[in-house]
Image: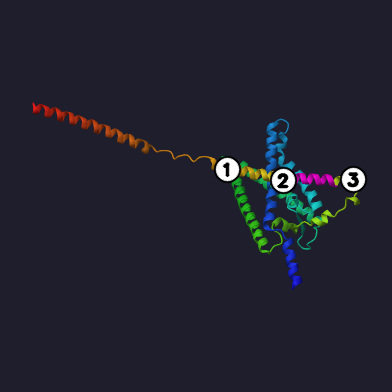
């Protein structure tokens, strides 16, 4: 019984929480719009020279993302965002390091699915800007909404199953690749002695170490800017004074009418008093 309890305890500790896996997904989805805004700003400063970069940004980002994710999957066993939170991928069947087929399949799913989703969203945005849509465009937009709703419902189902412990993976993409997330073994990765490596391999490792940590620092800086920007906007909206409600025409015209009626009654009263006093004086004489 003690051995089984110890085994269960070890499994629970090595299993990442739902907050960690969602955090790494949010980090992965933040990189694309952040880099796109940076490239858009640079191209506005140099419209003649770097216009092609803004036009073919999705393809350039696809190539760079493929190279980056492949290096991280090959060296650390996880994507860039997963390695940022000290997570790695293992085979859901053998609980060991995934083979090359699983590695390549996971790379294709990580890189191509967001690329196709961004292209589809851009195409739909262009269609919605048109005044009149053809029937095929309306059908495409409707199908996209249905697929998006089904996909989000499937993701939510996987989240619930992952929290309950009935599923080893939190994502349908990881399930398709036959992999799951676990904590990275930092001790075994730090025990690699550089004395056994050649000078060329040592320089290569140092360069990759510096590049990877600079990317992680840049990702942390982007998350901090996103948080700061949202907090700053919220504080600005709260700091603005609440204006008074505008006065309606009835509220403006009613006092004027009452004042005008009051003036006419006052003049009539003064006239009656003058005529009465004059009539009394005539009778008295």
Please, what secondary structure does the residue beneath circle 2 have? Answer: helix
Residue 213 included in the magenta stretch of the image: yes
Please, what secondary structure does the residue beneath circle 1 have? Answer: helix
The residue where tag 2 is placed is: 219
Which percent across, then down, holds residue 164?
Answer: 66, 63
Residue 45 included in the magenta stretch of the image: no
- Answer left or right for 189 relative to 229: right
Q: Quadrant of residue 222?
A: top right
Disc 1 packing (10 Å; few <14; some 14–19; many ≥20): few
Mark seen at residue 235: 1
Which percent across, then down, holds residue 109?
Answer: 73, 52
Please, what secondary structure does the residue beneath circle 3 have? Answer: helix
Determine whether label 1 and label 2 are within 8 Å by CB: no
* Secondary structure that dominates the magenta span: helix
* Residue beneath the point at 68% across and 61% down: 162
Q: Which residues are magenta?
A: 205-220
Q: Earlier in the sequence, mark 1 or mark 2?
A: 2
């Amino acid at each position: 019984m003690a051995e089984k309890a110890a085994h269960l305890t070890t499994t629970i500790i090595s299993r990442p929480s739902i907050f960690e896996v969602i955090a790494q997904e949010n980090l992965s989805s933040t990189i694309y719009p952040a880099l796109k805004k940076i490239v858009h700003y640079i191209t506005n400063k140099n419209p003649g020279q770097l216009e092609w970069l803004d036009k073919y940004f999705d393809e350039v980002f696809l190539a760079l993302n493929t190279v980056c994710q492949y290096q991280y999957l090959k060296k650390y066993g996880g994507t860039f965002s997963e390695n940022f939170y000290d997570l790695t991928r293992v085979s859901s069947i053998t609980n060991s390091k995934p083979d090359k087929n699983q590695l390549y399949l996971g790379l294709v799913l990580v890189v191509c699915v967001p690329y196709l989703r961004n292209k589809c969203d851009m195409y739909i945005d262009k269609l919605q800007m048109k005044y009149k849509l053809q029937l095929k465009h309306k059908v495409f937009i409707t199908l996209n909404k249905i697929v998006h709703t089904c996909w989000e419902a499937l993701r939510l189902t996987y989240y619930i199953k992952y929290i309950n412990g009935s599923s080893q993976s939190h994502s349908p993409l990881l399930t398709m690749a036959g992999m799951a997330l676990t904590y990275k073994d930092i001790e075994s990765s730090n025990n690699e002695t550089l004395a056994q490596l050649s000078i060329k391999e040592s320089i290569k490792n140092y360069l990759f170490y510096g590049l990877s940590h600079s990317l992680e620092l840049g990702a942390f800086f982007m998350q901090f800017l996103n948080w700061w920007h949202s907090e700053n906007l919220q504080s600005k909206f709260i700091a603005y004074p609440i204006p008074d409600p505008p006065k309606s025409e009835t509220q403006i015209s009613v006092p004027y009418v009452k004042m005008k009626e009051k003036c006419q009654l006052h003049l009539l009263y003064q006239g009656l008093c003058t005529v009465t006093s004059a009539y009394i004086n005539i009778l008295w004489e």
